[in-house]
Amino acid sequence: MKDGTPLVEVVNQRGIGYSMSIARGAIDIDLFTDLVTQGTEWSRTGDHTRATKALAEAMSLWRGEPLPEVASWGRADETIRRVTLRFEQARFTRMQSEFALGRDDHVITHAPALVDARPTSPELWRMWAISTLHVADASSASAICARGLSELREHGISTRPLEDLQERILRDDPDLRALPLEQGGITVFGEPPQVPTDFVGRQTDLAVLREALTARSAGPAPAAIVLHGASGIGKSALALQHWRDTRDGGDILIWVPAASPVTARASLLRCARDLGVPETVPDDDVMDELWRVLSAGPRWTIVFDDAADAAALTAYWPTAGNGAVIVTTQATRWNTGLATLHILPLDELDACHLLERCTAVDEHHVVNELARRLGGVPIALQAAVASLRAGTDATALLNSLTAAAWESGPAGFLPVWRPAVDDLRTESPAAMALASLLAILDTTPVPVDLVRSRRDLLPGPLADALSTSTGTDEIFAMLGRRFSVTTTPVSISGMHALIKTAITAELRERDEYDAWLRIAVELLESVLTRPDSDRPASDVLYPHALAVAAAARAADAEPAATIRLLLFASDHAAVAGEVVIAAKACTDALVVEERRSGRDSEEVATIQMKLGMHLRDRADLAAAEQMFTRALRIREHHTGPRSAPVSEALAAVGIVLFDHGRFRDARHYLDRAIAVQAGLDEVSPALRRKTLAVYGFVLWRLNELEQAREVAQEAHALAEAEVGDDHPIFAMALDNLGKVELARRDLQRALELNRRALQIRRTKHGTRHPFTALSEYHLARVLRERANADELEEARELCVHALEVYHQRFGADYGHVARCQAELGRVQLALGEHLAAVHTLTEAHGVAMRTLGVEHYETALCLSDLAHAHLAAGQPGHAISCANDAIATLRRGGEFDDQHPYLSGLIRLIEAAHAR
């Protein structure tokens, strides 16, 4: 920003602390922001040397300390507010990196000022105490812990981690001195819930956990157990308490929110990067690297919290030893063969013991009845404890509950939170406002930047509190005392679902719910419109977008924004490879759009096209065809028959008809799409490329190989011009052209094309991505046809690896599993393993029937391969039966005549079998 703008004048005249020393009369805010962003990223990925250098350079641009009040000047000075927050972030992150590098002198010098500004940060107190231990002695380090514990207790923040550290310091735990700080500094990844310091009971459950998990598996698989029970029963708290009771000094805890596989994947990716897996490793290879790092390091425990079902965790289950896995779930059935433990309510004695700490002796008879009515449900008991500690009369609280509140489900517990909500509304309107917002958002951690990003949308008290670090810490501390909410410098832990229910019920009673829903929608919309580099990561925003969209749908409010949030969530799930979730979010968006603009609007057609692609990806071809056909009809109505949108829809119908095996119908639609494109003044290169790619597939299947080659070469050239020669899209074009060259029997050219495609896929996607598996399948086909012994073994390895990827990502019943398994059978046949080929091809045929259908041409091709295997295995009768069934299926399809290689080959096979 250059001299002369109003902002610079304001900063120079009113904000001396914000003057920057790069040049007289100028402020390079962009440079400062870039340095903080880059330094933070390097710190997150473990490159602490570069992180400290970048952050020190950023902070050197400032003269003096920042002035917090500048951040409250109003909307006109949004840049100043954002720069203020960046400075706070830079100070904290630099401290973390200096600590990780073992620069204890820096930590000790700067820690006092930082803890004065942020006294509720356990992480700051921890770093200060450990650095003091290294430089001074245990007594001085323990004194710092004592100061920190006093501050945390005063603000209602969990003290258990700092208490544990103080105890280790006093017993002179050698791990605190011996472990390299880069490994020993951080032991908890993710954001576990706050476990109350007055955790009681559960001794039997803890003993079961210890027995199941402390004897670590000596093999490659970790020990594991599933904790199942109702919401609020204490599953997560029990898992965390077990880890705290059994860990050694360097043990690692990885907390994974697992309600959705999308959030589970994102959490593990962040953990892997924090543990040092380089950014150069593609996301789909990160899991393998994470397990490798964990198997070579300290003992670890992974908690998959609030998992929906076992299938959602298949792709993310650890393969490393030296660790343990705990799954918490509300699912009553978990059919995986793992040990399970049903978590029941606290017994009455423990429940009474918890409540008695907050009541007078003469109220014990009231406590007994209160414990009975709350049914031993820990989260309800903790709410009662918070209310009693805040001064609520025990008898009054008892009288607000029904005789057996716990039997009424969540609604029965609402009164126990009412005193805490009422007190918070009176004591701090700002904290109550933040609680109201959190009740609308998801239960996963909420980015602080999301809450602060548009203070102009928030009520005055909350906006004012969020403008300063002190005000922010105060309202965070109040939420911690009332609702067990914990915070880090970048996020606020999500609120428990039962507490959300209580707060939203109170908001509805006061007719405030709709207003808070609108605020949540606008906050998310505003942050999603910012550049990716200037907003929280998509995987962090994803669950909140889904939660707010669901709330808006239920309230029939904000339809346009709801659609945008659902489509964002759908796109993100698709990128993460979760096509079922992507299709569900897109379907929800379609329902809202049809209600908003009518069933035949252009907006509806756009969403139908997206949904059709998701349905195709999950192999629901009939539904995909229906979506594309409806979108085509709508677009023809609105734009006429010769427009770019119509061409796109024609090509999409052609694609799914090709998938169905209806090649002549597919060719008809693709001919129409190409004709429309030829009449347009301008056609998107991407649309032209996609249309030609599928057209080449159709010609290839119809055995029109020379024309197929010309079309594939044109698509290949368009891809290279569009994205370059090292992009996954170009790899797809290479694979497509390779298929045609293979059919033309130019095996050397096909080999070159498919090897190059696989190289690009492995570099860009990693080795565990489904697209990489697809390139492995294509290359295996070429290697088998070349019939070289070494290349046949390579083909086998490629097929086996591709099948592992497909099984892990999509399960056993998936179309590509059938194709890849059939290719493995053909490789076994080429290697002379005839009986093994029969077995593999029989399995492939079963998968094809279940996923593609009995009448699909690829199911018939599996039968054709099986017929060849039976004949080679000396089973001519089985060979004839399979061949006749395949011929009948192909003839019924009407796509191939008897001169086509598929049918003519089967006819020759039957003749050979009869001759035997």
Image (cartoon, rainbow, N blue to C red):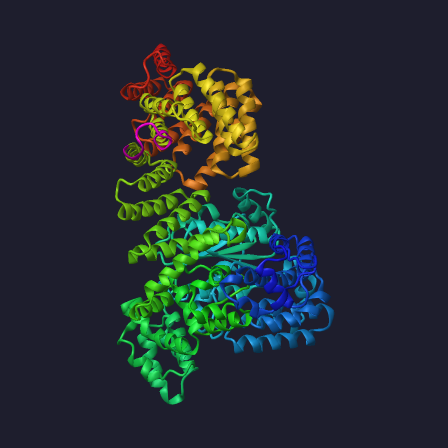
Residue situated furthest front in the rendering: 4
The image shows residue 361, relative to residue 547, as above or below, that is below
Asked where in the image residue 816 lies, by quadrant, the reply is: top left
The image shows residue 336, relative to residue 894, as above or below, that is below
Position of 297 with respect to 158 (left or right) is right
Which residues lie in the magenta part? 637-647
Residue toward you, 449 or 231: 449
Residue 221: x and y, percent? 51, 49
How many discs mark residues in the rendered view? Answer: 0
Q: Is residue 900 visible?
A: yes
Tell me the chief SS of the magenta region. helix
Quarter of the image for the N terminus: give it: bottom right
Residue plotted at (49% across, 60% down): 453
Position of 591 with respect to 819 (left or right) is left
Asked where in the image residue 365 lies, by quadrant, the reply is: bottom left
Residue 141: x and y, percent? 67, 73
Q: Is residue 644 magenta?
A: yes
Residue toward you, 58 or 134: 58
Asked where in the image residue 137 lies, by quadrant, the reply is: bottom right
Q: Is residue 613 magenta?
A: no
The image shows residue 281, relative to residue 660, as above or below, that is below
Q: Is residue 339 visible?
A: no
Residue 48: x and y, percent? 66, 55
Position of 24 with respect to 511 (left or right) is right
Residue 294: x and y, percent? 58, 52
Quarter of the image for the C terminus: give it: top left
